[in-house]
Amino acid sequence: MTLPPVAVTCGEPAGIGLELTEKAWQELRGGSAFFLIGDPEHLPGGVPCQKISAPEEAADVFPTALPVLPLAFNGALTHGKANPSHAPGVIEAIGRAVDLAKSGRACAVCTNPINKKALIVGAGFAYPGHTEFLAALGGQCDVVMMLASDQLRVVPATIHIPLSQVPTALTAEVLETCLRVTQRGLIEDFGIADPKIAVAGLNPHAGEGGAMGAEDGDMIAPVLNRLVAEGMRLTGPLPADTMFHARARETYDAAVCMYHDQALIPIKTLDFDRGVNVTLGLPFIRTSPDHGTAFDIAGKGLANPQSLIEAIRMAASMGAQRWQR
């Protein structure tokens, strides 16, 4: 059975997402198909595009034009300046993509970056961000954020909170959920039958036997021991400063870290332009480029499309894994 196309959302029209989508089509038009959900009038016009009425038309159109499932927006578009009147359309594009993925008419969703302030002002957006909205559309499932590239996959157990709040937020329940969702994602979406996960400690030197903090021995280690006894392949807690050199990375399929920068600094140092944001735990595949709307360069043709290209490629690959089951 033919793999359905990837649904790519328009994101914030005043940002770089639409120009990057055109560049991504130029790079990917010889491979797995994707289609854009958005207003064709917002496209820069650097490549041929063709309106489609259904995702099933995308594969035939894709080799010669960017397929667009049209969604009309209100209000004028000015690059680099969000128009709150666009907010309902941005939200609707995400909802349509999710519906198509859940029904099997799209194999995955790849989301272009949004501007949360514009969504709040223009549509009363009630979610902290993209991921929380997608989790709600998926049925309030447990989700974790993974940053992935060919060189490294990392998952932060806690995300956008002050460093001072991490020891309190990082509970045994939070860590266990993160590890289980990560393992399931590696199996179901990346096709790794028996994944190996390295787990960082919270403190320097993973606490050094309690001399530099008790959390590693008192909370993290017991969680890992219990899950290892169930059959999960976990190592840790490990000193984070020795986890990410080349030889260390060969020993695991993903690294779970305790806080945002502990996870994101290594992957952004190793592969800044190719990192992909993946939401694990959803009942559909979701990827996104690892950058924002970049209003300062929007419409100038300066934005690098590589992260979006990799996000679409990864979405298709992960979608194929689920499609085969």
Image: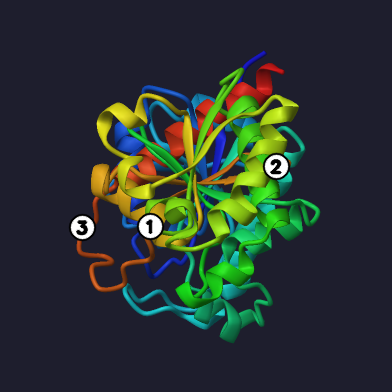
Question: Residue pushed farthest bottom?
Answer: 121
Disc 2 target residue: 100
The disc, 3 or 2, on the residue closer to the chain's N-terminal end is 2
Q: What residue does disc 3 label?
A: 301
Left or right, residue 165 beside residue 204: right
Q: Is residue 284 above or below residue 322?
A: below
Residue 38 is at least partly visible in this image: yes
Residue sitting at the far right: 139
**First of labels 3, 1 by sequence position:** 1
Residue type (three-letter) at the residue carrying disc 2: Leu
- The residue tagged 1 is 204
Residue 288: x percent and y percent?
Answer: 47, 49
Label 3 and label 1: CA atoms lie apart by 43 Å
**Badge 1 amino acid:** Pro
Task: Classify residue 213 as left or right of residue 309.
Answer: right
Q: Is residue 194 above or below residue 56?
A: above
Discs 3, 2 touching: Cβ within 8 Å: no
User: Which residue is more in the foreground, 306 or 242?
Assistant: 242
Q: Which of 303 and 85 is in front in this view?
A: 303
x 73%, y 51%: residue: 142
Evaluate whether residue 290 shows in this view.
no
Residue 95: x, y in percent?
68, 56
Quarter of the figure that contains the C terminus = top right
Q: How far apart are marks 3 and 2 (CA)?
A: 31 Å
Image spot of residue 149 (x, y percent): 37, 37
Disc on the earlier residue, 2 or 1: 2
